[in-house]
Amino acid sequence: MKNKFYILFLLIGFLSVTNLWSKTITVCATCPVKSINEAILQAEEGDTVLVKKGIYKEANIKIEKGITLIGENMPTIDGEEKGEIITIGADNVTLDGFKIINVGLSYTTDYASVRVVNSSGFTIQNLELEKLFFGIYLQKASNGKVLNNKVRGEAVTEFNSGNAVHLWYCKNVEVRGNDVQNVRDGIYLEFSDNITIKDNLSKNNVRYGLHFMFSNNNFVINNIFETNGAGIALMFSKFMDVENNIIQKNWGTAAYGLLLKEVNDAHIKNNLFFENTVGITVEGSNRLEYANNDFTSNGYAIKVKGACYENRVIDNNFLYNSFDISYNGRINDNKFNNNYWSNYTGYDLDKNGIGDVAYRPVKLFSYIVNRTPETIILMRSLFIDIIDFSEKVSPVFTPDDLMDENPRMKQINHDRN
């Protein structure tokens, strides 16, 4: 027992001495150290480099020791389009409080404003990134944080632009409170697990607000994805929670709020899908739970393309969508229950809040439009109303067992505070 206390005492003493040895190096136009690169060369493990307000025309800044690089009153680092601006290749690095502009453009190299490579315990926060190719690029990084950054790109097409926050082969990273706009993908994950995407605004991006590829056990919570080419694309991934997000106004011929392609064992809960061409497009995805969501004023609320099994659609509101459910095929292995449908015209004689007649949400007309898109011009015609009614009475083309046995009579109140 005495040996344990002795070791603990020595460890505390060592940490205290290390803290006493750490120093702060100040950078400014009138300081002895006038460049960020020079200050980093002088710094040792645990030191702080404090950069005063001003414009610093520097590129290829490499941080290969565990230091804190902090800006006072948002100094500007101008890369002068010479390529990568800051590269972090050490553990326990903090980068805080800079405006970083003018990354070099290349069609063979993914230049970034800030790149983190093989680093653990990093924090990238309070940055303003402009005139960029890629913004914050994390490469084989882990146990870090990307917090409260503002990224503004100038993307016109996806071929000449990069992503605002890009994660490749990363683990245990928190991406929170960022505002990313006008880039290719707002936030991109590939082969990255245990990532938390929370409290971000991803808006006006050319391709996706958020894009996952081959990434598992991730959380997407309390974000806003608005007016992107498409809101969220989750592909070839599993074990995810997508909760309490606002996904809205993603309009276009190929736009959707949420794409689920070969996604398994995920929870899609308490989200708002508002004014999207398609709220959710799903294909080859199994054991998903859609619960407590609001699908409001979308073209399609949920468009099921096929090969989707053992999914549950429960306690959702389907409000004023052109089509609530679009289904490709006649085989159904999914459960619909206790949802509110604004198009439901049944009755509730026992006044228990549940309709006495089951609701069939798949219209024959949606089946026709899927095969011949031009027929959409007939949508409000009497003829279409007649064939939809006929299909409900005696299903021929739509799944005869796809129905909500307990449709709610009143809209469900989903608290998102």
Image (cartoon, helix red, strand yellow):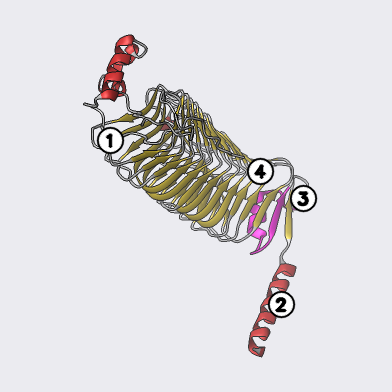
Q: In the drawing, what numbered circle is on residue 31?
A: 3
Give the residues drawn in magenta, as a range: 31-51
Name the N-terminal-most of marks 2 and 1.
Answer: 2
Residue labelled with disc 1: 401
Amino acid type at image mark 2: Gly
Q: Is residue 191 above or below residue 102?
A: below
Residue labelled with disc 4: 98
Amino acid type at image mark 4: Phe
Query: Which is more toward the observer, 164 or 381?
Result: 381
Callout in the foreground (1, 4): 1
Callout in the foreground (2, 1): 1
Q: Residue furthest left?
A: 396
Name the N-terminal-most of marks 1 and 4.
Answer: 4
Residue labelled with disc 2: 13
Q: Position of residue 356 (x, y in %)?
A: 40, 31
Let me know if residue 317 is in the magenta part: no
